[in-house]
Image (cartoon, grey):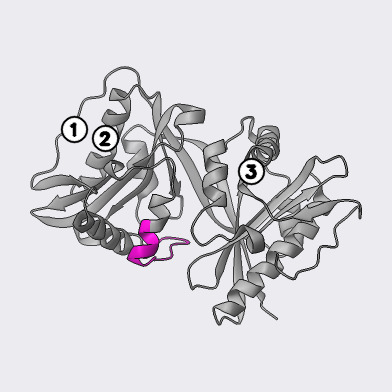
Amino acid sequence: MSGVSTNLPAPERSIRPPELSDAETILELVAAYNTAIVGFADYTLDEVRDDLVEPGFDPTRDGWLVFEPSGRLAGYGWAYANGDSDRVDVDVITSDPELADRMFDLVSERAREMARERGHQQVTLDKGIYRVDPMRAVLEARGFAPATTFQRMRIDHAGVVAEPQPPPGLSLRPATDDATRRDAHQVQKAAFADHFGWEAKSYSEWLDLHEAKSTFVWEQLSVADLDGRPVAICECTDQFIEDEDCGYVASLGVLPEARGRGIASYLLRRAFAVDAAAGRTGTILHVDSNNTTPAVGLYESVGMRSVLVVDIWRTTIPVD
């Protein structure tokens, strides 16, 4: 573990890094926490396992489990660096406000270490939180403030959804070969360059992140070519099949010069048709309400509705 303080409320509590074998215990804690706030678990065992083995995350330094003397898991926290930037995603899950505050000490100090290792003088911490989460009070006390809002949007499928016709000159390629994957990587970098929290990855890092996802296969990532030139991507995963029986559009991006031609709408409608044909009850995606493109309006125009709001709270602190 990192050499940060482990002085936690109730000295009899124990603390250690998470291991893959802890996945079910972590799921139980997070599911109970989420259910108390939004009424459902909003987390699956596959997601826990994927998080623990995600490339760039070192459980021995970047994660913490806090146990009661009885052996019950009381808290889970982690920090994840966004490439070489000064931004670090953090999270703390516990229903005990005092323990939450101490665990934020742990994740914040680890975030400082990450920033120092990357040569930064300050570190920006980002934490996602349900709008109705009482953890907001802990964040406010630590200097966090809302930075942006993500909406989870959904459309329900009843029966067959017609396959849409592509815009003139548009064709699709599944990312089942290296050349197409490289095109997808480049298109995604350019399409998302101005989006909140976006940090470009090298091609090898990008590959590793995709290969590590248990809910993704390369056939689910498509590159759209307009008159033979790659201009858009649509990446779908099975992330929401287990708990919602829904397909998931994890990434949808169109190059700036190709926007306004109906490409994004076509890719969305095609994803709906694929999900409906597979018997899924709906399709889900997430969108930044402050997106540099009018994405919320696009998704509403094809029949999607907002079903959950997650705010991103942010603070910037010195590393020393």
Determine contact: label 1, label 2, CB under 8 Å: yes
Q: What amino acid type should be assigned to the residue bearing mark 2?
A: Arg
- At 21% from the left edge and 54% from the top edge, which residue is drawn? 180
Mark sitting on residue 21: 3
Residue 273 x/y as whole percent: 26, 29
Q: What amino acid type should be assigned to the residue bearing mark 3?
A: Ser
Residue highlighted by disc 2: 269
Residue 297 x/y as whole percent: 36, 44
In the image, residue 49 sits, relative to residue 305, either above or below, namely: below
Mark 2 vs mark 3, foreground winner is: 3
In the image, residue 28 sits, relative to residue 15, either above or below, namely: above
Q: Quadrant of residue 167?
A: top left
Mark sitting on residue 132: none
Task: Find the distance from the CA under tag 2 to the CA under tag 3.
Answer: 39 Å
Quarter placement of the N terminus: bottom right
In magenta segment, residue 204:
yes
